Amino acid sequence: MIDGKSSEAGSGQGGGGVVLITGASGFIAAALIARLGERYTVVGLDRAGPPDPPPPAAAVAIDLGSDEAVRAALEEVRARYGARIASVIHLAAYYDITGKPNPLYDKVTVQGTRRLIEGLQSFEVEQFVFASTMLVHKPTATPEERISEESPIGASWAYPQSKVDTEALLHERHGNIPAVFLRAAGVYDDDGRSAFLAQQISQIYEHRLISHFYPGMLCAAQSSVHREDLADAVVRLVDRRHDLPSELPLLVGEPDPPGYAEIQDIVGEALHGEGWKTIRIPQPLAKAGIILQNEALGSEDFIKPWMIDSSNDHYILDISRARSLLGWEPKHNLRDTLPTIVAALKRHPRAWYRNNKLNENLVAWDEEPEAELAGSGHHQPAAAAGTGGIDHGGMDHSKMDHAAMGHGSGAAVAVMSDHGGHGDHMALMDRDERRARWALYANIGLGLWLASSPLIYDSMTTQSVGEAARFVTVDRGLPSIEWRASALAISDVVSGLAIALFGALSLAPRTKTWAQWAVAFIGIWLFFAPLIFWSPSAAQYNNNLLIGSAVIALSVLVPMMPGMSMAGMMDPKNIPPGWTYSPSTDAQRLPIVAMALIGLLTSRILTAYQLGHIDTVWEPFFAGSLADPRNGTEEIITSDMSKAWPIPDGGLGTVSYVLEILMAVMGTRDRWRTMPWMVTFFGILVIPLGVVSIYFIISQPIVIGTWSTLALIAALAMLIMIPFALDEVIAMGQFLAWAKRRGKPLIRTFFQGDAVEAGAEDASDVMASPSTFWADAKRGLTLPWTLAASIVLGAFLMLTRVILGNEGEMANSDHVVGALVITVAIIATAEVARALRFINVAFGAWLVAAPFLLTGAGPLGAIVSVVVGIALIGLSLPRGKRSPEHYASWDKYVI
């Protein structure tokens, strides 16, 4: 809105006089301004913008919540247009969907109208049209009954009640100004723009389970009115103002609306080629579900309990008065317009969601390449309040005056930079490849180093090695030390020569792709060879570990990874469609690298002991069994559980952590689409294998009877990695699902990656400072107090043996459940995994039942278990406050 300095765009147009429209920047006002502007001078009254009223309306700023602001606005109107006003069309009001009373209903709708009508008494006003709603009437019990202007008044919730109160106020105070109470049905247009209708359509489009259930009569019907038909009715009211009574209630809407089930079938057929199965459910069950979802789970769902109460309401209008006084008949009907609305959704899903104030991120991957051209304006996900337009009887409040409305934050907007033409890009890639050629030469040198290493090792014999290595040989029933050392030496010579050979072939354009990968796979073999042969030499083991890591990095990390899609590499977009950030930035991955490094350092110590390279393991806290001279860590890594593996299980951890580090640093911030295979294997290493290894570690005190400090440190590091890795895996999965829908070869896309049609580019330096690093690293992660409290309860459960004196079955149960509660709560700090917190509900239920099923708990321990279980259930229900981030279609699972 341009405050007092608007153009005189409306001045002088038409000879029909001046028309004032409040809420002039809204959805309905735009249609009225377009129609009335042809013959009248239209002045838009609204809060100071933007947005401004559309042309040809002139703009005057007004605040209906302030006496002084209303007087000032009307004085400006008088100064610019005189005291004679043909009509005032009062659209502005307060509206929200909570169904609860709000002081703003009185301040804005009722008292705002009072301020306006009182201020207009000094003008020559020929008509005052108050935008009311058909919902001021009591609904009928059956679809056969119709509502007329003489039907009983009886609003059922706060919004229509504010209209009832305002009509009563105008009845007393409109004075000599003729008043029309325009009781309109819910407004829609060819794009939808009706909040309730848009929700119904979107649920069917997304195949949501809730779309199949309705708590009211399936024939329940409510009249609607197309925006153009409503505008036509208003124009007729203004044109015929001299022929109308001094006070006129008037219903406007389509007299033959479709019922709920009919709308479902029309939309289902248009979207999915078949009618939509809809089942009626009891209202108490539906209301309980909504209360649980909104109150207990902390969801911000559109559906509110009061809507359940209104699900049987029929509002089918008798429009005889509009026909007789205005000659008005609707030219549209919802039944015939629904296919057009659905077609707009299918053509441009993201624009349709944006225009209907829904979360457009949910359908970002559904967008066609040219679809972004449709729609305009900055993205705003669905707002709980302030939906514009008339929705099943509500007038246009998209510019709801003075209301402090809550709006979701929009997706980050990034502009794709110009990377030049294809030729320039190829030249840059060729230059980068030449610059990285040193890495391939380095691999040749490393291969020769490895091949010559056996020549400088001391000979490994039973006599030359330490006592620990001899003990391992006997304890594990291994081949002789000489045989194992020789086998590993042969492996080193062959592997080293192979690395040198394939490193040389990597320099040739015709063989570089497969040769680079061959070097990488030999590097992986070097990780496992010392474990398979149970290397008796620490030097051999560490040499293999370091050389293996280096040749992998120098073959596929430093040079351009071979086999990647050219289109994918040329595409600069790195923010997935519907996301507000890239889940693959350096800052997002660095915490994983740090935790993996901690795990690597601890697992190397455990591996060295298992291979017999060291005699003892550092263990500051756990002495182990009194009957065993070894400490807790030594007992665990030589236990039967550990010996079940054919190779040192500590070494498997070392390999896992090294691969996690290498995969974490591989690629750029677009790797969620350029390296799907790598993100997949990285996710497998970190997430499912991480959870399994954590479980083995937490079960050690029960199975073995002691703890390991190093194992606990490694488990915690592994656990912290998981929430940081999840969002990238989700983005990669969405990319592959999109590629499959587009008919792209799935296997080729999985291994080579590809470009995307939507999305955005973010070239900011997230590593510029510690603050920018951490701000980016924690995107997608939140720690609500409920999860923090769950972690505390989990830690308490792990200590009930000490604190409460629990023993036996009960102590073991508390220990395992406590550790699992902590695991679930930490993983659920990732918003994409927030729903996993419901697993802790099951653990809480078990804690309630455990004292009655297990032995080992005293009276206090039993009571505490029940109390902690109930508390854990309560803490696991609310979602907690979520961040402003969006995750495309995964948003629906952040519950």
Image (cartoon, helix red, strand yellow):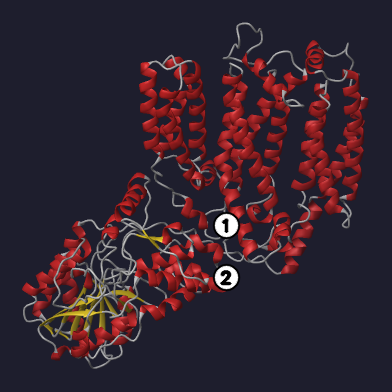
Relative horizontal placement of residue 532, taking residue 862 as reference (left or right): right
Q: Residue at x 77, y 50 (%)?
A: 559
Q: Earlier in the sequence, mark 2 or mark 1?
A: 2
Question: Answer yes or no: do the residues labelled 2 and 1 have beta carbons within 8 Å?
Answer: no
Q: Residue at x 43, y 74 (%)?
A: 266
Above or below, 171 against 889 in this view is: below
Query: To which quarter of the image does residue 178 belong?
Result: bottom left
Tag 2 secondary structure: loop
- For the residue pair 418 and 805, the one nearer the viewer reads as 805
Above or below, 642 against 417 in this view is: above
Relative horizontal placement of residue 683, taking residue 432 as reference (left or right): left
Quadrant housing the N terminus: bottom left
Could you say where residue 282 lies in the image, as x and y percent from the top left? 32, 55
- For the residue pair 820 and 861, the one nearer the viewer reads as 861
Q: Give me the disc on residue 575.
A: 1
Residue on which disc 2 sits: 368
Query: To which quarter of the image does residue 402 belong?
Result: bottom left
Could you say where residue 9 lies in the image, as x and y percent from the top left? 31, 84
Could you say where residue 539 lies in the image, as x and y percent from the top left? 82, 24
